[in-house]
Amino acid sequence: MVKAGKQIPTAARERCQALRTSIARHNRLYYVEAQPEIGDAEFDKLLKELEALEREYPDLVTADSPTQRVGGEPIAGFETVSHQVPMLSIDNTYSPEELRAFDDRVKKGLEPADSPSYVVELKIDGVAISLRYDAGRLARAATRGDGERGDDVTANVRTIRSVPLRLAGDSPPVLEVRGEVYMRRDELARLNALREESGEPPLANPRNATAGTLKQLDPRVVAQRRLDIACYDVAPLEGVELTAHWDTLAALKRYGLPVNPFATRCESIDRVLAVCDEWRSKRHELNFETDGMVVKVDAAAHRRRLGATSKAPRWVIAYKFPAEVARTRLTNITVQVGKTGTLTPVAEMEPARLAGTVVRRATLHNFDELARKDVRVGDTIEVQKAGEIIPQVLRAVAELRPADTAPFPIPSECPACGSAVRKDPEGVYLRCLNPACPAQIKGRLKHFASRGAMDIEGMGDVLVEQLVDKRLVTGLAGVYELSEAAVAGLERMGEKSAANLIAAIERSKGQPLSRLLNGLGIRHVGAHTAEVLAAQFTTIDALMDAPLEALCDLYDIGETVAASVRDFFDTAENRELIERFRAHGLALREEAPAGAGPRPLEGKTFVVTGTLRGYTRDGIRDRIKALGGRPSSSVSAKTDYVIAGENPGSKLSKAQKLDVQVLTEDEFERLAGGTP
Ligand code: IVH
């Protein structure tokens, strides 16, 4: 029996409609126009109001409501679907000569009087996708697959915030849009930081990360990883009038679809080459990865005349940028033991210049990976910056391998404590199972004392090594039991520095709960999660007693994280640790944020670039937060201010491009209500 919902009052129906229109508009302003009119908080308020209305009147819920992005349960697998118009691939070129040859072929294929215009776009490195809209509503999203048939990934693509569930404006009855789903670099960095916290291998580059995310069977996981989309074409279906690509891009924008962030029209191949050349270096400043440019004939009539081979259209070509790869010598492979006992092989190499920095070490992730790559000490290796961020060992150059090399032996015992090692249940990592392993204790202590955690000045890596080797500290609480005399007895430690260290340890007792939570090294809990937890629970006791459901309910905290927090506080030794902290007088609470003082930066988002005179990186973040502002690491149209110090990076140019207000350090101080 269908249960009839409550009678819906007209006012509620109208409010629901008004909210949806408003949400769609703000989404478009944000994702398509890059000109938001409201901030995150206000946007969330609209969404929350709509959710509440729909909860009260479930009959109001429709599939294209912005509250329905994340579907229900995980699915068993993806259905294969056929593309009505095949998704062809495109040919590649690698040199100006090849690009000129393309221009010659195009001209030969057209009438002598025709002079073709081109549109040049960034070639975003992600996963090709086809979106089908029926009567303006997102009906299906499919991967390219073999070009004829792909996977139906609708449930996953619906979670991408920049994909409109409903088109705006005068969209045709059926519209099939093609584009690239991708992951921004800062999002990959965020994800990899979380993965590192939880002992998972990092995702190698944004393209793999995107492909892996789209293949997730649980849309809720996809929703947590923020993907983006850039649309670049429309399939020629009946009822879709195409005159020129440039107009197609404009139409896509009108429908509320985000298009390629850079596209320009060029009247000659010389101009095309100049644009490509400009982006060869400028692309490193982008927050997403590009592997080249795509050059397209603009006029639809020209395209029709040129047609396609069985493989690729004749009116389009990719101009690929060379990947930055460096060759160097592998001097050693060391094995690191992390704070959770994970054994990680690390490649040590002769310094190599790569994409503007010098690389000396690169993680080899795990021993399976090492065996697969079979890199050996003495090899000449090729290294690459994956996603321009993490240096990665690509391969050993076989023809340059010296005669006397051997595969690196898989350790059977922990290099730090000699206990047996075991593969973890997921079967990827070797782990040292000895909780008293000095390498693990050192890892935990270094993290505990680090700047993002308890920020104990003077307790650097060298000192931690000594403290553990001399057995002066055997666990986190031991930090607070150190005597000045014991510290003064250590190498390179005078009485003065010992006193300073003890004072710094004493000061750290006042650190807010969020810092402590980060410092505890709870699996899956890094700085961000720690802040969310501390803001919500305020005291460690409230958090320790919080039921699993209360943890799961928090924004930004999923089941895995919640379970890990619960697990940590359900373990007797950890509760004991907290009690020892309490006995030593640690604050164990978050400072009361609201009403604690003036909050002149309330609701404003700040990004810092360059070196500041008066603050460390963490220092300025703390100050912004204390005054009610929100520090962020990447510049977007939603950023309110960028604080620029000495030697600012690409964030400054990004701010200027997006018209974000740039402040000097003094101007920031004035805004903050202090004196510069
Ligand atoms: S046009 C028939 N434009 O690159 C023309 N492709 O190597 C279809 N890509 O499969 C492609 N950015 O996934 C086009 N601005 C752009 C693109 C782009 C990324 C991808 C696309 C395609 C692959 C070919």
Image (cartoon, grey):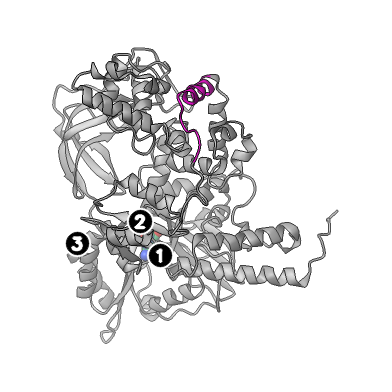
The residue at 28%/21% (across/down) is 465
Say which quarter of the image contains residue 171: bottom right
The residue at 61%/44% (across/down) is 553
Q: Amino acid at mark 2?
A: Val
User: Which label belongs to residue 400?
Assistant: none
Instruction: Name the front one of labels 3 and 1.
Output: 1
Tell me which segment is drawn in magenta. 573-590
Q: Which residue does the numbered mark 3 point to in the structure image?
A: 95
CB under 8 Å between discs 3 and 1:
no
CB under 8 Å between discs 2 and 3:
no
Question: Is 183 inside the magenta-drawn segment?
Answer: no
Q: Which residue does the numbered mark 2 point to in the structure image?
A: 607
Question: Is 584 inside the magenta-drawn segment?
Answer: yes
Q: Is mark 2 within 8 Å of ligand 1?
A: no
Residue 338: tell me if it is visible: no
Q: Position of residue 428 (x, y in %)?
A: 42, 28
Q: Amino acid at mark 3?
A: Ser
The residue at 75%/58% (across/down) is 56
The residue nearer to you, when weighing 576 against 363, is 576
Residue 265: tell me if it is visible: yes
User: Which label belongs to residue 637?
Assistant: 1
- For ligand 1, give the image quadrant: bottom left
The residue nearer to you, when weighing 277 against 605, is 605
